[in-house]
Amino acid sequence: MEKVSECKIFNGSKYVQSDIGGCYLSVEEDLKNEMNVLFSGTPCQVNALNNFLRRQNCPTENLLTIDILCHGTPSARLLTDYRHWLEKYYDSRLIEFSFRYKGDGTKRRMKYPMYAKFENGKVLEDAYTLRLYMSLYFSGLTYRDSCYNCKFSSAERCSDITIGDFWQYEKVMGKKELRGGMSLVMVNTAKGIRVAEKMTGAYMEEGDVDKLMYMRETFGATNGKTEAVDAFREEYKNFGIEYILKKYAGYNLKGRIKHILKKGLVAVGLRRLL
């Protein structure tokens, strides 16, 4: 991508493993042509890029790397199966989907606001069926093996800048967050500092990074792989997406009632009770 407008294609959170394809080769080519390159991805992807460029003896003066606070990546197959399930459920092809839909920012929404638009014109926001994928994600059962023993889930980062949701804002900053939430930006290198100093037009405040060091969940630390992960995978392989949605994601009457109650609390401004 060479234009800001083109970045909208990959804008927003993606709770799935991305396909790098030939991206590293493109970065190498652009850097050797003395172009400025911004690469963003999970910390393991940034680390892989750094190792690749080092082996290729590629200059990196014009490279800026940004990693995200990652809590694990499900396979692309899971999202594909879920998309097909949604299309069958609503009898229409899915043409738009967002994991973190904010709209115009005026409406109270659930913590992970979902959005979907189908070819037949049907539009869903925070619908029960849209929450099921995130329920699977937060079960901790859907990640890659390497995610359960991630060596990057600490304050020691491999990128110039780290970004993510600042869920620990009130603990670290000692005050309430602004409506709409706060983002965390960690500057990790001298190159990152130079870029951060040029940032304008955004509300920013400095925090105590030492307070973050003891909050493992901030950096994506997991509890490690358990036998439940193997059981989930075996059942998914043998019985398919709808079975695991029912067993692990609350695709049942109880789950539907729970969702309605949560959505009602959010609508009347009692989100913190959740």
Image (spheres, rainbow, N blue to C red):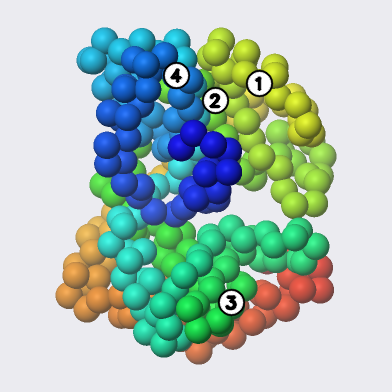
Camera-near label (2 vs 4) is: 4
Return the residue at label 3.
Answer: 124
Return the residue at label 4.
Answer: 35
Q: Which badge, 1 or 4, comes first in the chain's sequence? A: 4
- Crowding near the residue tagged with mark 2, few <14, some 14–19, many ≥20 C-alpha atoms within 10 Å: many
The amino acid on which the numbered mark 1 sits, given as a three-letter code, is: Ala
Q: Position of residue 107 (x, y in %)?
A: 77, 66
The amino acid on which the numbered mark 3 sits, given as a three-letter code, is: Leu
Return the residue at label 1.
Answer: 196
Q: Position of residue 117 (x, y in %)?
A: 54, 73
Q: Residue at x 61, y 72 (%)?
A: 126
Q: Which badge, 3 or 4, comes first in the chain's sequence? A: 4
Q: Residue at x 37, y 22 (%)?
A: 30
Label for residue 225?
none
Q: Quadrant of residue 188?
A: top right
Q: Are marks 3 and 1 in contact (CB under 8 Å)?
A: no
The amino acid on which the numbered mark 4 sits, given as a three-letter code, is: Met
Q: Which badge, 1 or 2, comes first in the chain's sequence? A: 2
Q: CA distance from mark 1 to mark 2?
A: 9 Å
- Crowding near the residue tagged with mark 3, few <14, some 14–19, many ≥20 C-alpha atoms within 10 Å: some
Number of marks in the rendered image: 4
Q: Quadrant of residue 226?
A: bottom left
The amino acid on which the numbered mark 2 sits, given as a three-letter code, is: Ile
Is the C terminus in the top left, top right, bottom left or bottom right quadrant?
bottom right
